[in-house]
Amino acid sequence: MRKPKPLYEKFFSRDFSLPIFEIWGKVEGSKNKFWTTEAQPFLPYIVFRNIGKTVESYYDPRGVKWIQDTLISRSRKDDDFLKDLEKSASKKIKNLALVYERQRLLSKVELVSFLKDVEAYWPWFEALWWACGSHSQIGTHSASLLKLREQTQDFVPKSDALVRASLAHIFPRLERLSHTLTFKEVVSQKPPSRETLQKRSVGYFLVGGVLRVDVTSSDIELEQGIAFEQIDVETGLREFKGQVAYKGKVQGVVRVVLSARQIDKVEEGNILVSTMTLPDFLPAIKNAAAIITDEGGIMCHAAITARELEKPCVIGTKIATKLLKDGDIVLVNADTGTVFIKN
C-alpha cells in the first residue's frame, strides 16, 4: 500500500520581502538552534507560496509538534530554561529594535548586517513563539513569556518594513520589484533581469532554501511527495464562525486588507477583514468597527489590539478573506464568534 502524503497546513499569510522569507525558512528548517542539538526531522518543514498579493506559509504539522514537544521536554528537564529564554530573548531584541524602530534607510553594508542580525535572533523568536503556543503545558513561567511575546510582535513586520524601504533606496531602478531580490543578490548588488523579478512578484515557491518560479503547486507536491491543505468555501455560504477575541455586535461594509499598502481604504465604521493584522494596520484598525481574520490565537496581533481598543473581533475563521469581498455587508456577532453575510 502506498504511504499517504503528509498534508502541509497553511499557518500564515504575510506580505514580506523575499530576504525575510529566506531567513524564516532557513532558520526554522535548520539544526542550528540553541535549545536543541537535534535537527528538524520533517523536511521540508516549511513551503512558502507567493500567490501575488501575499505569501502563504505551509507547515508540516508533524514538524510543528516536534518543536513544541522538544520545547516542553526541555522546560521540564531544566527549571531555568524558560527563565533564560525570556532573559536572553528580551536582551537580544533591544539592539535590533533600536534599528527597526528608527526606520532610517540603511546602506547596502548596513542592510546586510541587519539581515544577519535578524537571522541570528530568529531562533530565539521561534522558541518564544512556539513556547507561547504551548503555554498551558510549560508551567508557571508562561505568563511572563506571553508578555514578552506580545512585546516582540513588531520584530518581523517592522524589520521587513525597514528591509523593503532600504532595498528600494539601494536599488531605485527596480522600483517596487526590489523586495523580490534574494539575500545573495543584495550582497552582490547584481540583480537579475526585470523580467525575472516580475515573475517572482506574481508567484514563486521557496522550498528548503531553493527559490522556484514557473512551477505549479502540483509540481511542488509531486517533487516533494507532499500535499497542500485545500481550504474550500461552500457555495452560497451565508454565515461562518471563528474564535471570539473581543465581544460585541456590529454591522458594516467589508474592506479586505492583505497588506499595509491597502490600509487607506478602510473608512470609519468599515469591517476590517484580513488574513492577520500587523502593527502597520493600526490606522485601519482604529477606523474599523470590527475585525475578522483568517488566522488567530489568543496572542495574535488582532486579538491583542482588539482588546486594547475594545473592538469586536473574530479570529481564526480560515475562510474570511476567501469568502468576503470589498463592499459586502456583514453582521459580526463577536459574542458568539459568528459572521453573517447580509447582502
Image (cartoon, helix red, strand yellow):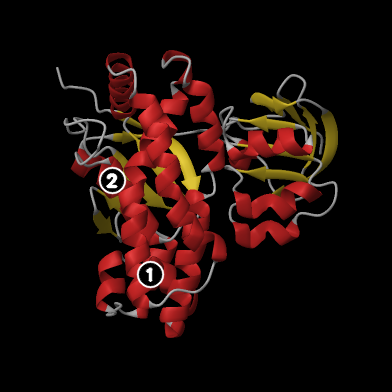
119 and 191: which one is in front?
Answer: 119
Mark linked to residue 25: none
Q: Nearer the viewer, residue 178 or 328?
A: 178
Q: Is residue 61 left or right of residue 312?
A: left
> Which residue: 17% across, 33% down?
39
Residue drawn where x is 54% and y is 49% of the image: 154
Disc 1, SS: helix
Can residue 12 be seen? yes
Quarter-of-image position of residue 212: bottom left
Quadrant containing the C terminus in the rendered view: top right
Image quadrant holding the N terminus, namely top left
Total tally of numbered discs in the picture = 2
Give whichever of 59, 28 is nearer the camera.
28
The residue under label 2 is: 27
Q: Is residue 197 left or right of residue 6?
A: right
* CA neighbours of label 2 inside 10 A, class few (<14), some (14 to 19), many (20+): some
Task: Give the residue type that dot 2 points to.
Answer: Val
Image position of 64 (left or right of 156): left
Q: Secondary structure at mark 2?
A: helix
Quarter of image, res 199: bottom left
Distance in Å between CA atoms under marks 2 and 1:
18 Å
The answer to whether 118 is drawn above or below residue 58 in the figure is below
Please tell me which of labels 2 and 1 falls first in the chain: 2
- Local packing at callout 1 (Cα closer than 10 Å; few below 14, some 14-19, many 20+) is many
Residue 158 image offset from top left, x and y in percent: 52, 56
Q: What residue appears at the point 49 percent right and 45 percent down from the top-left corner?
A: 13
Q: Percent x, y for residue 167?
A: 43, 73
Circle number at residue 111? 1
Could you tell me which residue is drawn at 85 percent across and 46 percent down? 269
x then y, percent, for residue 255 = 73, 50
Q: Position of residue 122 (x, y in %)?
A: 35, 46
Which numbered disc, 2 or 1, marks the residue closer to the eye?
Answer: 1
